[in-house]
Image: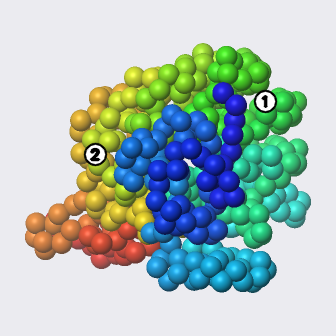
Amino acid sequence: MKFITYNQKNFNKIEYLKSIPVEIKKEIEIVSKVLPFKTNNYVIDYLIDWDHYENDPVFILNFPNRDMLSEKQYEMVEKAWNDKIPDEEFQRLVNKIRLQLNPHPAQQMTNIPKLDGIPLEGCQHKYQDIVLFFPSEGQTCHAHCTFCFRWPQFVKDLDLQFSMREIEMVLEYIRRNENIHEILFTGGDPMVMSPKTISKYIHKIFEADIKHLDIIRFGTKSLSYWPFTFIPAFSDEAEEMLHLFKQITDQGMHLSFMAHFNHPNEMDNNAVQEAIYNIRETGAEIRTQAPVLKNINNSGKIWSDMWTKQVNLGMIPYYMFVERETGPYRYFELPIAEVYDIYTNAIRYSGSLAKTVTAPVMSASQGKVHIMGIVDNDISSERYFMMQYIRNRNIEETYKPFLMHYDAKATWFDQLTKVKEPIVM
């Protein structure tokens, strides 16, 4: 299958969109001036039920709608577009709105490390044992998720991106920090790069021969959005890509795919199932993760079905996240208490091999906060969230349970207050 990309400039060429009302297509176009939009022919042909597109989870996952902006923001962009104001003025308006959408949540900019005083702009080091590397060639995706917390990576006209090509500097940084034993290629999606490009980075890792660096990870949505990357019958480069993965595992390094699946429908066809099989045959493992999203996957049954399919295909459920407070999160957010309820309803009816998942988790400024449960105090009639950091900037603060005052409406960690006084239960 030939790869065809669609974005706000040419999405009207998609045959299926002929049945969509003109006003809906206009809304997609207006919102995509603010939030990056991109899709492809695999998503269009394989993943969306066009007879019921309005409620189709993958359509909502991929196509922006007007409710992803506030009414005021939408009206401002719509008016400016209809009035045909000068391009520079229009772009200033769009960028102003983008900056209102919290483009770098959880203090991401504070995670940039330095080597001999030089900031490694395409690298993040938040947790002791792992660095994130943003290769310049991988700062796009096969298609864009509407909820994506990394949406600023796709905005070219604002200085909001992480990226670099100089992996040698990152490797030198790793060499000097013996606690680091993982490197995560992220983006965007590193799997948009050709195997030849990825191979250059990987072979520099081999040549560096850093004894304490023994895990390579790829954060990717490619299994859902373009599985042909890993199917030789469809792609001349797929064999080369799979051979590269085999080289990594033959080198004695652990290779892990951090695969993003947001709904069971993304795993229902032969293409993705063959791609999963081919990757696992190289010795790599595939771990799955996704946030709970209103309008897409906010039910326990959806998650139970999704984890069951993943386990049956040989993948490992890894994280269930709470949607981050960035971009159009108001459209997707749910109260923390509701997310926890979804999780418990899902995990109860999932098989034992799905219980590898850590959930629900918030990627907050200090680290990944795990919601362990909701506690009732029979004496005071108070309720609490019991939580712990499973990842923290300060490793000594991990796995120490603590209580937060219960708030049924809170959708993010920062909206809660920590219990400081001793509690009698």
Name the residue that disc number 1 marks. 195
Q: Residue at x 39, y 54 (%)?
A: 54
Labelled disc at residue 424: none
**Quadrant of res 361:** bottom left
Q: Residues within 10 Å of mark 2 (few under 14, many from 20)?
A: many
Residue 404: % across, % down: 33, 69
At x 69%, y 35%, the residue is 3
Up-down: is 255 above or below 250? below
Q: Is residue 305 left or right of residue 266?
A: left
Q: Position of residue 262 (x, y in %)?
A: 45, 44
Q: How many marks?
A: 2
When the figure is inspected, residue 341 is found, relative to residue 215, above or below; the finding is below
Relative to 10, is 120 on the left or the right? Answer: right
Q: Amino acid at mark 2?
A: Gly
- Quarter of the image with the N terminus is top right
Residue 300's disc is 2
> Is 212 drawn above or below residue 146 in the view shown?
above
The local secondary structure at tag 1 comes to helix
**Viewer-proximal residue, 42 or 332?**
42
Quadrant containing the C terminus is bottom left
Confirm whether residue 264 shows in the render. Answer: yes
- What amino acid is found at the position of numbered circle 1 in the picture? Pro
Q: What x and y, as percent, mark residue 49? A: 42, 41
Colour scheme: rainbow
Q: How many angstroms separate mark 1 from mark 2 (CA)?
A: 38 Å
Give the quarter of the image for residue 221: top right
In the rendered structure, the answer to whether residue 259 lies left or right of residue 178 reads: left
Label 2, secondary structure: give it: helix
| Residue in view at x 74 percent, y 51 percent | 139
